Image: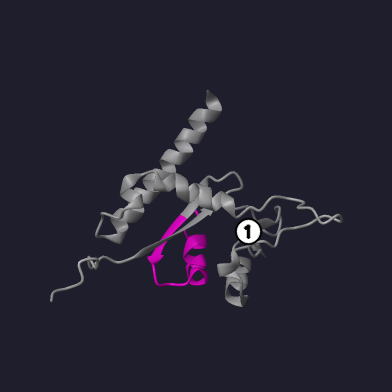
Amino acid sequence: MGANPTDRAKNGTKRGVLTEAEGGPVAVALAPANRHDSLVLQDILEAVVVEPPNPVTGPTQHLCLDKAFDGTPSDATARVFGYEPHVRRIGEEKLDAKGRKKHPARRWVVERTISWLNRCRAILTRWDKKAENYLGMIQLACALLWYRRKWRLTT
């Protein structure tokens, strides 16, 4: 018997994406697939390409996170980078006095951006052996998303 035919000896990859409120990608980070999401948060926040406003003089920057980032380390990491973390569990939405949803959940914004990135076949199926090449492909796809968005707004 040989090696398992489904094991192609490729490393699994986790893509961490930080988006702005409308879904435009602001930062992308890669991590091994077996690393917990809360440990990837620092890499994602360090990869931000746009200078955020000063948290002391500017407006408070809110960071909406999912259940994987619930915990003291993630909370501390977000606060070190000047963000106010908001962690909501699935089904736990903000309700008004009558028990109705006050605001829609914001978690889907990142999921939608990841779906947009998955339209690129080279990202959906990782063909690159080197992580640097794969990260470059994801960053190029993010730039294309911003270009398409800018084009849509000007026409």
Q: Which image quadrant is residue 31 in?
A: bottom left
Whether residue 56 is visible, yes or no, is yes
Residue farthest to the front, as pictured = 1
**Front position in the image: 45 or 93:** 93
Q: Is residue 43 left or right of residue 129?
A: right
Name the residue rendered at 49%, 29% in the picture. 151
Residue 147 locus on image (x, y percent): 45, 35
- Looking at the picture, tell me which residue is in the foreground, 72 or 90: 90
Q: Position of residue 124 (x, y in %)?
A: 35, 51
Asked whether residue 38 is drawn in magenta, I would say yes
Q: Is residue 119 above or below residue 99?
A: above
Q: Position of residue 145 (x, y in %)?
A: 45, 40
Query: Is residue 92 toward the left or the right of residue 122 in the image?
Result: right
Characterize the local packing of mark 1: few (<14), some (14-19) or many (20 or more) Cα atoms within 10 angstroms. some
Please check the rendered image and state whether residue 92 is part of the magenta-colored stretch, yes or no. Answer: no
Give the residue displayed 33% in from the left and 65% down from the top: 12
Q: Of all residues shown, which one is farthest toward the right?
A: 97
The amino acid at mark 1 is: Cys
Position in image of residue 38 (x %, y %): 52, 70
Do we see residue 19 in this rendering? Answer: no
- The image's colouring method is one colour
Number of marks in the image? Answer: 1
Q: Nearer the viewer, residue 114 or 143?
A: 114
Residue at image x 71%, y 55%?
57
Magenta segment: 28-49
Q: Look at mark 1 in the image and give the residue it sits on.
A: 64
Judge whether 149 appears above or below 75 on screen. above
- Secondary element type, mark 1: strand
User: Which quarter of the rendered picture does the N terminus lie within?
Assistant: bottom left
Q: Residue furthest left?
A: 1
